[in-house]
Amino acid sequence: QVRLVESGGGLVQAGGSLRLSCAASGRTFSSYAMGWFRQAPGKEREFVAAISTSGGSTYYADSVKGRFLISRQNAKNTVYLQMNSLNPEDTAAYYCAAGGGSWYVPRAPAEYNYWGQGTQVTVSS
């Protein structure tokens, strides 16, 4: 069992930055790939970024590539999402998730086993 708690969301102006954190409980954090997803009102949950168990491999949605950076610190049971050059289209609830393993980094929501409660990011124009 893994419990995930996101933090760091808030209101920011277009062009600004935010860093989201996701703290995990349990001693198995390092055995899971981690992902960030987002969901805007009336839209489906969409993939944002994912990172392998070691942190050596990262994956991004085209919409955030070059602006967002996912990282993790296994010693702190934490995964981060640094978001730069934010625009109003990035407004959504952001969720972190744990799934897969050392052999696989999922990108589909259905492939993740554990989810946080979400943190709201609002970008004003």
Image (tube, rainbow, N blue to C red):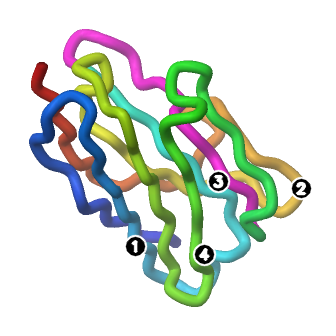
| Label 4 environment density (alpha carbons within 10 Å; few <14, some 14–19, many ≥20) | many
Q: Type of residue at label 4?
A: Phe
Q: What element carries label 3?
A: strand
Numbered disc in front, either 3 or 1: 1
Q: Distance between the residues labelled 3 and 2?
A: 11 Å
Highlighted range, magenta: 41-53
Asked if marks 4 and 3 touch (Cβ < 8 Å), the reply is no
| Label 3 environment density (alpha carbons within 10 Å; few <14, some 14–19, many ≥20) | many
What residue is shown with label 4? 29
Which residue is rendered at x = 14% and y = 40% of the image? 12
What residue is shown with label 3? 99
Q: Type of residue at label 3?
A: Gly
What residue is shown with label 2? 103
Sequence-first disc among 4 and 3: 4
Q: Quadrant of the C terminus?
A: top left
Q: Residue 23 carries which label?
A: 1
